[in-house]
């Protein structure tokens, strides 16, 4: 049977009610008896600590937690930092930023991140070198791509692709929420995969009318924090109710596990065949180029260096499979 993990990203260091929204979401999952897989930025960890929000941090203790870069949309982003440097220089830079994120994460949660998730899918292969050195065994939202969304190991780190998602604008509209929920639940039943990742949004974007990082679009940096406008109370409540209903239905359909549990499922690794390598060579560059068009990135970001560095590590790919049950 397919097991699923449900992801949300907790990353807004600016808007004050984002903290309450993050706490509400953690308690929603806990109340339903569901272990979520939540990505936290280092900056969000520092913000919650400095605001004395131990209640928010405590609410996440029952869940699986990952590192979502140190500063997410602040410039330079991961891709902006790594696009134009050699792989060796990039490894040094990536280790410096992700070490800062890891330190903040540890101060907040007193544990190591179970995985690393790219911010806005921003990524470059030096990240895998850095997180391996930091003892983080896996990355989610993988841009490295194999047929059938297969889990794989790339440069020594386990790569978890994202299969399905439902957005905040879907949650805010009950008709759209039920339509999208139904589609995702059907996909969970139809997709022949031992594990599926489902992304269901950002707590802050349920509470506010826009993403917290819009002021950082196209390479911009703000002189002082620019707050988003609050969604009205009924919209926020509708988002929570629709998400809650989806989670209850999903729970009836498939076991919901954390990424820490997924990594313990007994994966075995083998070398890829020719078809799998050809898929990697053709689809991975598309995914990287797509991610480079994230609106936050500076206009002149050229992803081709990242594509080349990624393809040069092709020989490190191993396909993950579960042993066939007898
Ligand atoms: Zn994010």
Image (tube, rainbow, N blue to C red):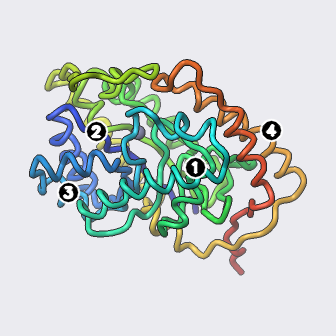
Label 4 neighbour load within 10 Å: few <14, some 14-19, many 20+: few
For the N terminus, which image quadrant?
A: bottom right
Q: Nearer the viewer, residue 9 or 110?
A: 110
- How many angstroms separate mark 1 from mark 4 (CA)? 28 Å
Residue wearing tag 1: 189
Q: Nearer the viewer, residue 200 or 309?
A: 309
- How many angstroms separate mark 3 from mark 4 (CA)? 41 Å
Q: Is residue 321 above or below residue 309?
A: below
- Viewer-side label of 3, 2: 3
Q: Is the residue indicated by label 2 positioned so its CB lies within 8 Å of ligand 1?
A: no
Residue wearing tag 4: 282
Residue wearing tag 3: 57
Q: Which residue is depicted at the point 36% across and 29% down? A: 168
The mark nearer the N terminus, 3 or 4, is 3
Q: Is the residue indicated by label 4 positioned so its CB lies within 8 Å of ligand 1?
A: no
Residue 94 pos. (x, y %): 51, 51
- Does the residue at mark 1 contact the one at mark 3 (Cβ under 8 Å)? no
- Viewer-side label of 4, 2: 4
Where disc 1 sits, the SS reads helix
- How many angstroms separate mark 3 from mark 2 (CA)? 14 Å
Where disc 4 sits, the SS reads helix
The mark nearer the N terminus, 4 or 2, is 2
- How many angstroms separate mark 2 from mark 1 (CA)? 27 Å
Where disc 3 sits, the SS reads helix
Residue wearing tag 2: 203
Label 1 neighbour load within 10 Å: few <14, some 14-19, many 20+: few
For the C terminus, which image quadrant?
A: bottom right
Residue 232 pos. (x, y %): 16, 21
Q: Which residue is depicted at the point 48% across and 65% down? A: 136
């Amino acid at each position: 049977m397919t097991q699923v993990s449900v992801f949300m990203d907790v990353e807004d260091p600016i808007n004050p009610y984002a903290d309450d929204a993050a706490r509400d979401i953690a308690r929603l999952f806990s109340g339903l008896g569901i272990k979520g897989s939540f990505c936290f930025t280092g900056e969000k960890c520092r913000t919650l600590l400095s605001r004395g929000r131990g209640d928010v941090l405590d609410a996440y203790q029952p869940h699986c937690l990952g590192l979502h870069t140190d500063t997410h949309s602040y410039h330079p982003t991961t891709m902006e930092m790594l696009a134009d440097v050699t792989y060796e220089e990039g490894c040094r830079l990536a280790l410096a930023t992700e070490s800062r994120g890891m330190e903040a994460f540890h101060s907040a949660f007193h544990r190591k991140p179970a995985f690393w998730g790219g911010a806005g899918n921003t990524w470059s292969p030096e990240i895998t070198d850095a997180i391996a050195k930091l003892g983080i065994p896996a990355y989610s939202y993988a841009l490295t791509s194999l047929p059938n969304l297969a889990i794989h190991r790339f440069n020594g780190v386990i790569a978890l692709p994202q299969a399905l998602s439902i957005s905040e604008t879907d949650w805010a509209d009950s008709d759209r929420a039920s339509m999208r929920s139904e589609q995702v639940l059907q996909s969970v039943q139809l997709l022949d995969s031992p594990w599926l990742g489902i992304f269901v949004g950002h707590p802050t974007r349920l509470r506010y009318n826009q993403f917290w990082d819009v002021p950082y679009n196209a390479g911009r940096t703000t002189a002082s924090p620019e707050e988003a406008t609050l969604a009205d109370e009924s919209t926020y409540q509708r988002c929570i109710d629709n998400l809650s209903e989806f989670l209850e239905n999903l729970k009836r359909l498939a076991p919901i596990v954390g990424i820490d549990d997924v990594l313990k499922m007994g994966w075995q690794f083998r070398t890829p065949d020719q078809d799998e390598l050809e898929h990697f060579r053709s689809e991975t560059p598309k995914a990287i180029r797509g991610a480079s068009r994230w609106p936050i990135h500076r206009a002149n970001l050229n992803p081709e260096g990242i594509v080349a560095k990624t393809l040069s590590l092709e020989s490190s790919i191993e396909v993950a499979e579960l042993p066939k049950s007898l």
